[in-house]
Image (tube, helix red, strand yellow):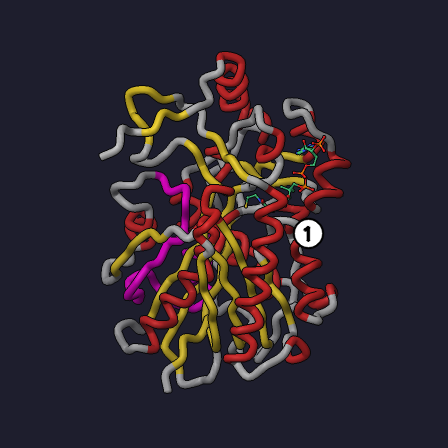
Amino acid sequence: MTYAKITGWGKCVPPAVLTNDDLSKFVDTSDEWILSRTGIQERRITHVELSELATLAAKRALAAAGLEGSDLDLIILATASGDSLIPNTASAVQRNIGACNAAAFDQNAACSGFLYGLQMGTAMIKSGVNRRVLVIGADRLNYYINWADRASAVLFGDGAGAVILEASDDACGLLAAKLGCDPERRDILEVQGPGTYVDRFHTSACYNIAFEGPEIFKRAINGMNSACQTALSDAGMSGSDIDVIIPHQANLRIIQTLAKKMGVGMEKVMVNIHKYGNTSAASVAIALCEAVEEGRIQAGSNILSAAFGAGLTYAGVVIKWGDRVTPIRTIDDELPPCDKSASELVSSAVEGCLQATAEGTVNFARSPKL
Ligand SMILES: CC(C)(COP(=O)(O)OP(=O)(O)OC[C@H]1O[C@@H](n2cnc3c(N)ncnc32)[C@H](O)[C@@H]1OP(=O)(O)O)[C@@H](O)C(=O)NCCC(=O)NCCS
């Protein structure tokens, strides 16, 4: 039987750090509120396009696997904030890494996108269509933030993470996955602005992330809990077999509740939300990379991973790690230097959002019904 082994992993977080105290200078909030309600202390703001973050994560993952871009058959880029819709952003990454033999596409399952991509890549390998697949999760949701809305302005960070999947006889990789979507209340988490539903001649450039936090909180736990239970049972495992949980990093309280429901102690749960906030599709991918780097994942580890996102998409998966936790190669590549602080990077967007709010233009006329 063929499995899809994770043989390479890499992440890229931009260097500019926006702390809760920095945010409090232009958003009506406080470090105390953000930390106690979410677990976030700081987040990263990108100074380069999303494709550059995704490219560096991909290059690091390729090096860890000891591969070149030309070895890849397929690139799946999970994102909801690509550089452009047409052409897709995966093709920019493909060009940057020289993946001349690969197919490449973007996929949007919001914050669950990386786990959706992992299952798709695994299925392509197991079915024999592909042998080497690059799965990237990358997002810069800060681009969509209405900085005048304190509810959403404190939650998100930018970043990218990637893994290489390779066909293998070893019984490892994604052993079971339950993906789902709960569309009845898809309205409770919405990025207002981009999309063809907007009347493009009567609109504002101030995007807005609108959501009902407490309702998402409840549905996220229900969705991830049931998906994880299904994935565990399909893998013939229970919570006690799990060595590490890698959850989507949206809220520390959600993570703690999920761990409790799984019967797994918090010492086995990978948490990095304090450093990065919610990086959307990149969240699980970055956490997975850091869990390997920190030695939390070891050869043969059983990993339970879960995510939820707009849609409301959700996923619960069981992964068995392979035999190698050290990269075959590392690279010296870095992002271009950033000569601005994170506050400076967002300052013109903050100004624009405050102005649009004062003028009452943070609204989007829908296109006439087709
Ligand atoms: C978003 C989330 C952190 C909000 O936490 P919460 O405990 O549910 O807070 P509420 O939305 O009920 O708001 C509680 C109070 O804090 C206030 N508040 C909201 N954001 C605030 C902020 N950044 N700073 C200070 N106060 C804030 C609200 O106005 C409200 O005040 P009120 O009680 O006077 O009306 C939480 O609901 C959550 O994590 N939800 C799931 C994840 C999610 O939605 N992520 C976003 C998209 S993926």
Q: Residue at x 54, y 60 (%)?
A: 223
Rendered position, 141 above or below 26 = below
Q: Nearer the viewer, residue 27 or 297?
A: 27
Q: Which quadrant holds the N terminus?
A: bottom left
Q: Residue at x 56, y 69 (%)?
A: 228
Task: Find out if the beta carbon at label 1 lies less than 8 Å from the nearest ligand 1 atom.
Answer: no
Split into quadrants, the picture shows ligand 1 in the one at top right
Q: Nearer the viewer, residue 159 or 177?
A: 177
Counting the numbered discs, the total is 1
278 to the left or right of 331: right
Q: Give the residue pinned by disc 1.
A: 252
Q: Residue at x 70, y 41 (%)?
A: 41
156 to the left or right of 33: left
Q: Nearer the viewer, residue 122 or 6?
A: 122
Query: Hey, which quadrant is residue 222 in on the image?
Result: bottom right
Q: Residue at x 66, y 69 (%)?
A: 262
